[in-house]
Image (cartoon, coloured by chain):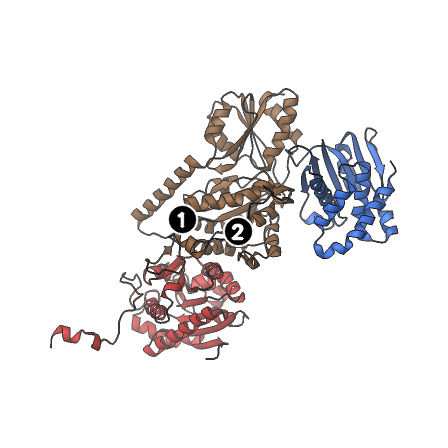
Chain colours: A blue, B red, C brown
Amino acid sequence: MKQEIIIAGFGGQGVLSMGKILAYGALMNDLEVTWMPSYGPEQRGGTANVTVVISDTRISSPIVDTYDVAVILNQQSLDKFEHSVKPGGLLIYDPYGIHRMPERKDIRIIEVKAMDATIEYGNAKSYNMILLGSLIKVDPIVSIDNVLKGLKKVLPERHHHLLPANEKAVKIGMELVNE
Amino acid sequence: MKQEDIICPENRVYAKPRLLNDNTMHYCPGCSHGVVHRIIAEILDEEGYADNTVGVAPVGCAVFAYKYIDVDWVEAAHGRAPALATAIKRLNPDRLVFTYQGDGDLAAIGTGETIHAANRAENITIIFINNGIYGMTGGQMAPTTLEGMKTATTPYGRRIDLNGYPLNISELLAKLDGTCYVTRQSVDTPAAVKKAKKAIAQAFANSMAGRGTSVVEILGTCASGWKMSPHDANLWMREHMGEHYQLGDLKNEVKQ
Amino acid sequence: MNQEVKLMKGNEAIAHAAIRYGVDGYFGYPITPQSEVLETLEAEMPWETTGMVVLQAESEIASINMVYGGAATGKAVMTSSSSPGISLMQEGISYLAASELPALIVNVMRGGPGLGTIHPSQSDYFQATKGGGHGDYHLIVLAPATVQEMADFVGLGFDLAFKYRTPAMILADGIVGQMMEKVVLPEPRPRRTEEEIARQCPWAATGHSHGRKPNVVTSLELDSALMEKNNERFQRTYREIEKNEVRYESYHTEDAEYLIVAFGTVARICLKAIEDARAEGIKVGLIRPITLWPFPYDAIAEASKTCKGILVTELNAGQMIEDVRLAVGRNMNVRHFGRMGGIVPNPSEILSALKKELIGE
């Protein structure tokens, strides 16, 4: 079992930390994992992406050509990564800010209106957690329990009072997709 | 009267300090370094620092300071002595750590390290020999060379419009919050030597007491570089260097 | 053994490993992509626990000279930086080598020349393995490919540095510095006591002379005959290191008709390319030099015996390839595939290069 996942969007959308929580979740699931970010100034407002490879065997390359799963949060990332999804793979996208919808016919495409849900929830910082919820609902590579354990690892202790709000956000995300 | 009657402990008025060894110094006749080395060696012995000191030698005429004073030394790259001293002191906080630097080392290539070590209030002593010239490389202009002073690279005299102003680095260091004691001394007369010795002893005491950075600038002579006799160099130093670089304490936050 | 598996970046692993190894001091200056080393150390506050000194210096020049000062007193001291910062440090590194001081320098490489890019590169191979600063010297150069090796090479680097009294370098690329994966950190051990340092480093300028002759740490020797003797001593040490400390890993070399030589994270991307190649029936093996100096010349020569060609894959214009050519001689077809400027090739690019350069497809 191996999944090569890319999460791509704008800096500030929580792309890197979403990947991080997913990676920690995989760690909790006792899987091998690599988390490889794009880094530098582009984190501060430009495009940002992170590649997470999760496997039950040793991972050779943290850099891959094609992805089993792409989580796409802006137009630039859709343009860049739509064609890198493996045939039969999965593309999750938020239509907010996307004007050209994905066109591939040989992959599963799931629309998640995470931004709308975030606005409705009223907690701007929960955007990436809502998306993560949707992701693990569609692609249960990591259990929700382990995602929440991962979140606990990523959040500094002084922010642990935010855990319930984040758990709620994950659940909102899970409910956004009906499989 | 026999020779033994004259050379006996009762008649001794001066002895070479224990920590100043018998290596032949490479300094030119009339150079100030020898005197400053001697008073440092005296203080290290008298104040009980001999087995508890790391000196940091510069690049410049005093590059071989480690050959003459018998304590542990590290020889720094040009200008970097305060960076070395920072680490040595922080990693060995009970040791006396001092740097010994010339004007090129401290006030040109090493300005950054000097200012930042002093600004961090490193508990080190910086002994700064200012003779307004690069002695070791053959008498080129130093940052502290006076206006009009002839050197190998200012053969017609230092021009402000070409070379900028003589750098009063000690005045600059005195303004930093990290320094506790900044003083300018000389070693051209016995009285001046006594005062300079007192100043270095004070600086060492500050370093051991953790009061911040102490800087002892000593106006030195470079008879060879200035192309003067040692005697004339001393007179010229007091008249000209002393005029631009006023002797005395620039800052002393330690009340005696 | 009940070892906790953690998930962290390579840069963070270096910081944690340093604290656990009992490093006495870290001195550094921020530069992307390795600032997490200093940031992690400042956040961990090891001065409260192990007594380790951590200091943000005013420049890379000050950092390496702080390392030089600390190392001269026998302490285990280190710095980290990225390519332009490492260039600034070269004078100090030369002094460390010439004064026979153990120290650890971490270079998380970014693309150059000049200010270049913050993205990953391996273009400091020449600088790291052929000297870097002025004079005849070598560093022991370790090239990690995993976050685990980032952690492990801190201890290995210091052990080798103290064993041979010479500075060691971890030459990482920005990928392994920035990526997170699982790591088991080394068991914590106490910093050495003053007595242990005095015993291990009788040469150190500790300031505590207590009856011994003063110790002077210097690289200066104006007597040419003595300076030549110093150089001969350095060279004897380097020959010893070459004899004892070559490290490399090989994969699938037993039946390989083609060989890829790559170091650092690139070797892992190559490994995936090799898996893909083998799935197509192309027999490719990999040699990953772990010590870039000393270089595994013999291992590569041996593995190449059954091979028709070698592809050297690097994030540069062709640097390690010179050592591979030295290893195998002129009769072997040795080709290069490199990306520059911060671009990291995909496994498929490497596989295409292999087919194009060696198989003629």
Q: Which amino acid type is shown beneath numbered disc 1?
A: Ala
Q: Which residue is disc 1 drawn over?
A: C98
- The answer to which of A126 and C312 lies nearer the viewer is A126
Please give left or right for residue B211 compared with residue C315 in the image: left
Q: Quadrant of the C terminus of chain C?
A: top right
| Residue C173 seen in this snapshot | yes
Q: State the image coordinates of residue A74 (x, y, percent, origin top left).
A: 80, 43
Q: Please report contact status of discs 2 and 1: CB closer than 8 Å, yes or no.
A: no
Q: Amino acid at mark 2?
A: Thr
Residue C140 drawn above or below residue C208: above
Q: Secondary structure at mark 2?
A: strand
For residue A73, say whether it is visible: no
> At which x and y percent is residue B252?
48, 76
Residue at the extreme front of the image, as rendered:
C1
Q: Residue at x 49, y 35 (%)?
A: C247
Q: Quadrant of the N terminus of chain C?
A: top right
Q: Which mark is residue C79?
A: 2
Dot 2: chain letter: C
Residue at 42%, 39% (x, y): give it.
C241
In this rendering, the count of numbered labels is 2
Q: Position of residue B153 (x, y in %)?
A: 41, 61
Classify mark 1: residues with Cα within 10 Å, few (<14), some (14-19) or many (20+).
many
Above/below status of B45 relative to C351: below
Mark 2 vs 1, N-terminal side: 2
Please, what secondary structure does the residue beneath circle 1 have?
A: helix
Q: Residue at x 55, y 42 (%)?
A: C152
What distance separates the C-alpha of mark 2 from that of mark 1?
Answer: 18 Å
Instruction: Work out whether residue C8 or residue C312 is closer to the camera in this orientation and state it.
Output: C8
Q: Nearer the viewer, residue C177 or C43?
A: C43
Residue B119, position as x, y percentages in the image: 54, 66
Q: Residues within 10 Å of mark 2 (few under 14, many from 20)?
A: many
